[in-house]
Amino acid sequence: MITAHLPALQVVVPLVAAPVCVLLRRSRGAWMVAMAVSLFAVAGAWSLLAGVLSRGPTSYLLGSWAAPWGIEYRVDETNAWVILVVSVISAAALLFARRSVEREVETDRIHLFYTAWLLCLAGLLGMAVTADAFNVFVFLEISSLSSYVLVSLGARRQALAAAFRYLVLGTVGATFFLIGVGLLYQVTGTLNMADLAARLSELGPHRTVTTAFGFLAVGIAVKSAVYPLHTWLPNAYAFAPSAVSVFLAGTATKVSLYLLLRFLFTVFGLEFVAGGPVPLLLALTGIAGLVAASVAAVRQEDAKRLLGFSSVAQIGYLVLGVSLLTTAGVAAALIHLFNHALMKAALFVCLGAIAYRVGSVRIADLAGIGRRMPWTASALVVGGLSLIGVPLTAGFVGKWYLVAAALESGWWPAAAAMLLASLIAVAYVWKLVESAYFRAPSPAAASVREAPVSMVAAAWGLAGANLWFGIDASLPIDVANRAAAALLGG
Amino acid sequence: MEAFLGHYNYWIVVALMMAGLCTVATSGNLVKKVIGLNLFQTSVFLFFISVGKMAGGTAPIVAEGWTRYSNPLPHVLILTAIVVGVATTALGLALIVRINRAYSTIEDEEIRRADLHRLP
Amino acid sequence: METPALIFCVALPLAGAALVVALGRWPNLREAASLGAAGWLFLEVLALLPAVEAGERPAAVLTAVIPEIPIAFEVEPLGMMFALVASFLWIVTTIYSIGYMRGHGESNQTRFYACFAIAIASAIGVAFAANLLTLFVFYEVLTLSTYPLVTHSGTDEARRAGRVYLGILLGTSIAFQLFAILWVWVLTGETGFRDGGILAGHAGPAATGALLLLFVFGIGKAAVMPFHRWLSAAMVAPTPVSALLHAVAVVKAGVFAVLKVVVYVFGPGHLATATGAGWLLAIAALTVIAGSLVAMRRDNLKARLAYSTVSQLSYIVMGALLASAWGIVGAGLHIVMHAFAKITLFFCAGAVLVAHHRTEVSELDGIGRAMPITMGAFLVASLSIVGLPLLGGMWSKWYLALGAIEAERYAVLAVLMLSSLLSVAYLLPIPVRAFAKRSPKAGSGVEEAPWPCVLAIVITAAGCLALFWYADRWLRLMEQLVRT
């Protein structure tokens, strides 16, 4: 009974739980609500994915209104996968968040913090699950507005400025998206994605459709921080509360990239996309992002900011994979999307734990924590190795398929750029590792203890997942291949 | 000329949109940035609404003597979008208040400079 | 032939590492664990030899990371030989380390023994790798596990050296080797090692040439110039590390990988069609000569030995690139012969350091009187490197020369001759100084390094001699490579 309503419950439960947090006014209680909701979402996402894998895509009609008119929620391999990623990262981030938020956010605001968190979760899950273009916009704004709030709650004043810049760029991006949706509606008279796809393919080449595509693509690119529209990201990640960095790094850009896939392949269709300059543009931005953001990452002195730039570079990998427009490329991008969420969440958890004890994440202040905080630091190393793409970590599998897909399509420069970026990743990850293990402790770090158990558990849970999916990657590979085949085939 | 005037609603939308975006991009004052953002969003609302309007049509309520009705869906959508816009503006302004308290300025350039002196 | 024992061979040193960490507080037990693991591993590896000699290929699958390409092991003659050498010399080096580390009062000995064991595990993994991915995985683990050994002293100099070490080895392997592996996979749809190679029929001359270039430079551990700097940088490590890892396990893993890729991925026949193979051969030859020339000018004993290694490694690369049957046999044999000779030389250098705190060649005047056994062994090993008869080093040079003639590359022959002369010039002055000159600080009487060091030196020097007489078994093993 309840499983039939799961697609809607994924969104409704966090949405309803959010005001509950406001009413509770207790920080611990709000955390427990958020955690319970996240765990429910994980269970729901798992059941959705299992259902899709065994029975194929399911469709859910909100309020039982028939599809092109009512809002349809549709779950297939691709978004079941994204939903799972989002809910798992939310749960892991919350496990870490309890102690961290108590330290970083004022006590009388903590319940509001979790309210915003739940709203953000609802928005992200909604973006993934809905099959209605305008509904996507609504959820996009729900998640964006709440993430501006979350970022602005950072302890330092730079968080406010970062949140404001994020708000301006994010709103422009979302409004671009809205214009695109409006233009599509004007041409086709529908908002349902499947319906849109059918009518667009009947329509053939059309200038308004091309314009709509342009607006949608730019809007999504801003939200997913595709280079060079990434400028909001490094500061937002750097100055947000540690827990928020974990959550956003693992989820926000990933869901936006899912939107890119959805619009490229489901709505506009392979034929439309392949005909234009889109693949080339995507590939160029991907390569530029890979290289430029990696180089920028090496030059950072703040570890969180460094990881922010590295995220931009990783998005370059994903965009590059998508730009190939082949099943192999899209599957590789989906695998890497999952892996990147795991590794970045793990790394940000470790930095959050370090911030909790040392009070700073400047690379110089990381000195010597390898001895002082062995568990946290070793999880940091695992996450870093995964980020580089060392074999037997999850990162390797994703990169392997990405480079192989590029070579299969004969895109030599793309393959070369990916390997070059991996090399640069060695340099910036090494900066962290060397500081942590091969430097004498800084005065700030000399007397610290290991992080609280909940943080270490979150860090090693995520780091362990990085190792697990580096050794047995059959689940992501299987899901990604089927999802890519469905996206490009249908 | 016909094509130009016949689509006058689009021209208004485009003009407003450009004015809004230009303000967001060039203005250093954060409040003005929010105003620009508002202008930009409003232009899109206008666009949606004008698309739904049928020349000579009335509100979509069945009434004697009317055969043409405006499409209500864009209007409904825009109601939602307006709410989103208001929320964005409110949040933006709230952030500006906090920024003003923390930096004693709401000029983008001055904020940047204030942070330069003590980078993280 | 399914043989789970292969996985055990890789796991054994890892278990040894864990035991070493667990016993860290009791040095005697810790070192007993190290030694026990080494001995057991050697016996395990030795037990595989009869089957391989009979032409069988024991195999085992560990896990399937990527469905089509599992992490899997398969023992073929070349890997058998490398594993035997690495595991045997691990025993000897452990004995030596006990004397050296205690005699020299090194710190962090537990980390040292643990990382050492992990490095051996990955060397065995490289030796037994059944496909390119497995090879790559253990190659990278080998790099990472030896990094703490290189930076063991923790000084700024060691850290700088560590950065060069890691930068070159990781950099080349990711940028070139991984690229090449992926390319092979895309071209052929497989990455397994097969008799006769897998590329034939899939890659044209230009692609084959490009792949060869990527592999030779991507396997940075083979130290072909210009990617040789890491080896001299790694010399800041304690001497047992330089001895086993940077004369045997790490560098040999590099040339072994080159040889394995040439034999089982390219296939000697297909390799001959590659464009630009001649240029690569020239670069390897240049490395042989240039390495020798630099070695002559180094006064620091370990640095001189390191450049000698750079030069000798390229013998093996040359042998592989000749793509002739005898060249490959010679290259395979040279892995063994050079391993025994060079580890002896490094052991001697470490013994001199422990007993007399001398590191420069110019300080060695008259030291032969104080350390007759050590310097005698040094002489034996030097002669083996030069390639004189009655020592193992002769055989590998002999077959390499045959290979050059077979491939009608007479320039390579000339390079072999010239470099033998050069090695006389940079190695022999050392024992000559030690025995013929008088020490300015006339310390009379014999003062050798601690007995475990001397024992290890005697074992490996005796090995150099024995290899001359018992080379036929190795030879037959290597001939399996080129029989088809």
Image (spheres, rainbow, N blue to C red):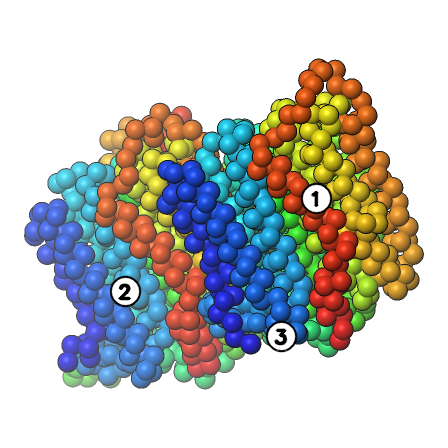
Residue furthest toward the front? C445
- Sequence-first disc among 3 and 1: 3
Query: How far from the left and from the top, in percent, is residue C227?
Result: 69, 45
Query: Dot 1: what SS?
Result: helix
Chain of the residue on which disc 3 is drawn: C
Up the image or down, B85 lies above or below A101; here it is below
Q: Is residue C211 left or right of residue C97?
A: right
Quadrant holding the C terminus of chain A: bottom left
Rendered image quadrant of residue C364:
top right
Residue under the point 67% across and 45% down: C460
Instruction: Check if mark 3's residue and mark 2's residue have beta carbons within 8 Å.
Output: no
Q: Residues within 10 Å of mark 3 (few under 14, many from 20)?
A: some
Which residue does the numbered mark 2 point to in the structure image?
A: A125
Q: Which mark is residue C461?
A: 1
Q: Residues within 10 Å of mark 2 (few under 14, many from 20)?
A: many
Residue under the point 59% across and 46% down: C92
Query: How far from the left and from the top, in percent, is residue C391?
Result: 79, 49
Quadrant holding the N terminus of chain A: bottom left
Q: CA distance from mark 3 to mark 1?
A: 32 Å
Q: Is residue A340 visible?
A: yes
Q: For the residues carrying marks 3 and 1, which lies nearer the camera in this image?
A: 1
Amino acid bearing label 3 = Glu
Which residue does the numbered mark 3 point to in the structure image?
A: C56
Residue under the point 7% across and 51% down: A24
Query: Dot 2: what SS?
Result: helix
Q: CA distance from mark 3 to mark 2?
A: 56 Å
Q: CA distance from mark 2 to mark 1?
A: 69 Å
Q: Residues within 10 Å of mark 1 (few under 14, many from 20)?
A: many
Question: Which residue occupies the foreground of this view, A188 or A294?
Answer: A294
